[in-house]
């Protein structure tokens, strides 16, 4: 579903991604971990071309992301993204936040979009919040709305960039629970997180990045009990 082949990326002179090779299969849940500044967000942002790569090959669902002829808007419809900061429209009700893209981009009728939005609000556990404004919600609830909004486009891939990092600790669990249930439904997910419990329980594969490189790639049981790379060992030991 996602293929990086020897991808490099520079920000000016700064070499932020170095020789990235990564293959994510359909339905796979890949968790990306690593120190701050290691290039995790940049890696995610390349997948929907929020950042262009400098060289190498990057394909999503068989489409070359950076090819001139690629219809990037169409490709982006297949890729939902959830950020640390929820970026909901503050002046729109929850339901309207969710129906906006399906009606404007996919051309779905308001009525159908609203019905679908309610299904996803139920899925994330807050159907009763459809008619309130984002400011009336807790951080955890806002992030669940952001997830529902992403799902409403029926993407093939969901990207999560530290979705719980801005939340108060008591709200982290409710967002992770929603992500866990998604993971079990077979949507392809790439998740950047510092939540090692989630990574251990839900990931099919852990990618450990440091200084722009994928340093280690392993199944969670293997990675957490016996990381091969010294940098991964040091990273894990600092988390405890
Ligand atoms: P992470 O998500 O792992 O913390 P990032 O992908 O955000 O890492 O950043 C990797 C490195 O690239 C950092 O050193 C960061 O300062 C730098 N960087 C990120 N975005 C930009 C940008 N738009 N321009 C220049 N440098 C950037
Ligand atoms: Mg980041």
Image: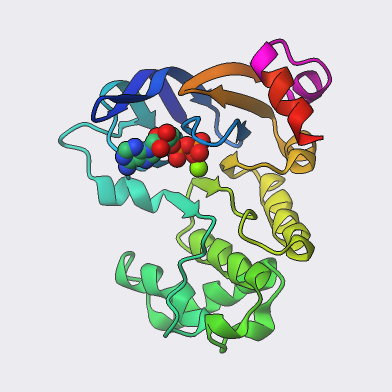
Q: Can residue 49 be seen in this snapshot?
A: no
Farthest left residue? 68
Seen in the picture, residue 19 relative to 172 is either above or below; the reply is above
Q: Residue at x 75, y 56 (%)?
A: 177
Q: Which of 81 and 209 is in front in this view?
A: 209
* 209 over 51 or under it: above or below: above
Q: Residue 223, position in %: x, y?
A: 75, 21
So how many labels did they put on this image? 0
Residue at image location 56% in from the left, 89% down from the top: 131
Residue 115 placement (x, y as % from top left): 54, 78
Residue numbers of the magenta segment: 218-231
* Residue 59 in the figure: left or right of residue 178: left
Which of the colour schemes (rainbow, by chain, secondary structure, one colour) is used?
Answer: rainbow
Q: Horizontal and vertical percent for residue 77?
A: 37, 53
Q: Which residue is drawn at 48% across and 19% down?
A: 213
Outermost residue toward the bottom? Answer: 131
Question: Is residue 19 depicted above or below 199 in this figure?
Answer: above
Q: Quadrant of residue 205?
A: top right
Quarter of the rendering occupied by the C terminus: top right
Residue at (59% x, 45% y) in the render: 187
Q: Is residue 133 or residue 209 the one in the foreground?
A: 209
């Amino acid at each position: 579903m996602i293929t990086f082949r020897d991808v490099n990326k520079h920000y000016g002179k700064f070499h932020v991604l170095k020789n990235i090779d990564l293959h994510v299969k359909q339905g796979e849940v890949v968790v990306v971990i690593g120190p701050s500044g290691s290039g995790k967000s940049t890696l995610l942002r390349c997948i929907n071309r929020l950042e262009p790569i400098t060289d190498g090959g990057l394909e999503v669902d068989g489409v070359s992301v950076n090819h001139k002829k690629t219809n990037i808007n169409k490709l982006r419809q297949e890729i939902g993204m959830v950020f640390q900061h929820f970026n909901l429209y503050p002046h729109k009700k929850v339901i309207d936040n969710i129906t906006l893209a399906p009606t404007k981009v996919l051309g779905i009728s308001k009525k159908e979009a609203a019905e679908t939005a309610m299904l996803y609000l139920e899925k994330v556990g807050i159907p009763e919040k459809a008619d309130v404004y984002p400011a009336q919600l807790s951080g955890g609830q806002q992030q669940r709305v952001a997830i529902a909004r992403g799902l409403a486009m029926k993407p093939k891939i969901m990207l999560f960039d530290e979705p719980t990092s801005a939340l108060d600790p008591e709200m982290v669990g409710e967002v992770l629970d929603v992500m866990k249930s998604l993971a079990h439904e077979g949507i392809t997910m790439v998740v950047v997180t510092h939540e090692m419990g989630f990574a251990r329980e839900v990931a099919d594969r852990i990618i450990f990045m440091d200084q722009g490189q994928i340093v280690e790639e392993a199944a969670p049981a293997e990675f957490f009990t016996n990381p091969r790379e010294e940098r991964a060992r040091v990273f894990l030991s600092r988390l405890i």
